[in-house]
Amino acid sequence: MIKVLIVDDSALIRSLLKELLSKEPDMMVVGTAPDAYAARNMVNKFSPDVITLDIEMPKMDGITFLAKLMKARPTPVLMISTLTEKGAEATLKCLELGAIDYIPKPKVGVAEGIEDYRQLIIEKVRLAASTKVKPTRTASAPIKEQSIIGGTEKIIAVGASTGGTETIKTFLISLPANAPAVVITQHMPPGFTTTFANRLNTLCKVKVTEAKGGERLLAGYVYIAPGDIHLGIERSGADYRTILIDSERVSGHKPSVDVLFRSVSQSAGQNAIGILMTGMGKDGAAGLYDIRQSGGYTIAQDEASCVVFGMPGEAIKLGAAVCVCDIKDIAENVFDYLKKTGSGTRL
């Protein structure tokens, strides 16, 4: 039985979440708290398996409470986040502090919105209950620029979902300013990806931006798929350019890692480097296999460093990964491969 504690200053949301989760045979809501102080007492009393935590609360906000909780009693936490720029910034901070994932809070029509998210909420609570809270990790030292083979034409494609914001950050912080172009699909709603890209851009030596479509892929640049649209690449003469594809969900997602990886496989072939990181489900597994089949180099994040081993685990089962390694070692692994292979060619 999964013991859930609901922490939210909205009586309506507390009631709706309690009603929704209590209907599940494997879940029990052990308490609901209107603020962090009441929540602290309930954590000590009930030892919940999962906490749903509102970010904006009186007396003590969710970020402050989360930071204290992770030091005193690490527990799987799902943030309740508004789909706004301010909400995105706060949510990313919470994921950095150790929250497992987040649940969108409807802007209007709360009751209807919660019902629309019913299956998503249930899945995320179950997932959080099965997840071990991982301590925050410092990134590896950045790779020196002179260690890169000059003129390389490789394209690095990265896919991630649950837990991916921190693993992507760990990887990108390790990259030197003249790294090959990187394209990324991280499962995120619209608006969050803009904030995510801007946040990474302040932390990394590479320049990080949300893809607009039509950009020439340049060394030292990272292009992140916008929420709710697929990202791919295509050849344009001797160059590669980003493309945005407004089509149906693929592998249950939009943006989809499979869409990105397949386009990279088709356009870059043996010059592609595919990296599949932490995430629930199997999006990206088949696409990573395509990259390997086309002669590209492929990496899956190992189970020990994943928040959720679903996506990379599925890729490993398919035989899609040339290498399986800890997140802190992925950047070094990529550049060891670049040194061995030397410059690629786009044509």
Image (spheres, rainbow, N blue to C red):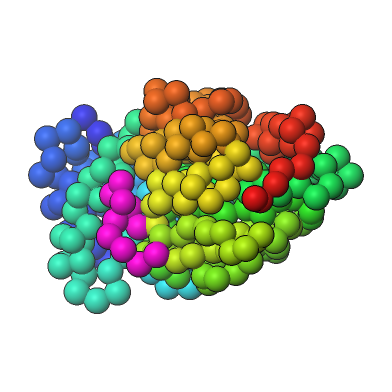
Q: Give residue 75's position: percent from left, percent from top.
A: 43, 38
Q: Please identify the dominant SS of the magenta region.
A: loop
Q: How far from the left and from the top, in percent, is residue 162?
A: 43, 45
Q: Which residues are magenta?
A: 245-254
Residue 241 magenta: no
At x 55%, y 71%, the residue is: 214
The mark tally for this picture is: 0
Residue 287: % across, % down: 43, 41
Out of 262 and 56, give the one closest to the viewer.
Answer: 262
Instruction: Name the residue nearer the viewer: 77 or 161.
Output: 161
Residue 55 visible in image: no
Extreme residue toward the bottom, this view: 108
Q: Can you say whether 101 is above or below 138 in the image?
A: below
Left or right of residue 330, residue 178 in this image: right
Residue at 14% in and 44% down: 22
Q: Quadrant of the N terminus?
A: top left
- Residue at x 35%, y 37% (from the top left corner): 282
Q: Dividing the picture into quarters, in which one does residue 50 lie? A: top left
Instruction: Using residue 321 as the reference point, say whether residue 111 is left or right of it.
Output: left
* Image vertical order of residue 46 relative to residue 317, above or below: below
In the orientation shown, which residue stands out farthest toward the right? 146
| 93 or 315: nearer the viewer | 315
Left or right: 291 in relation to 187: right
Relative to 302, 217 lies left or right: right
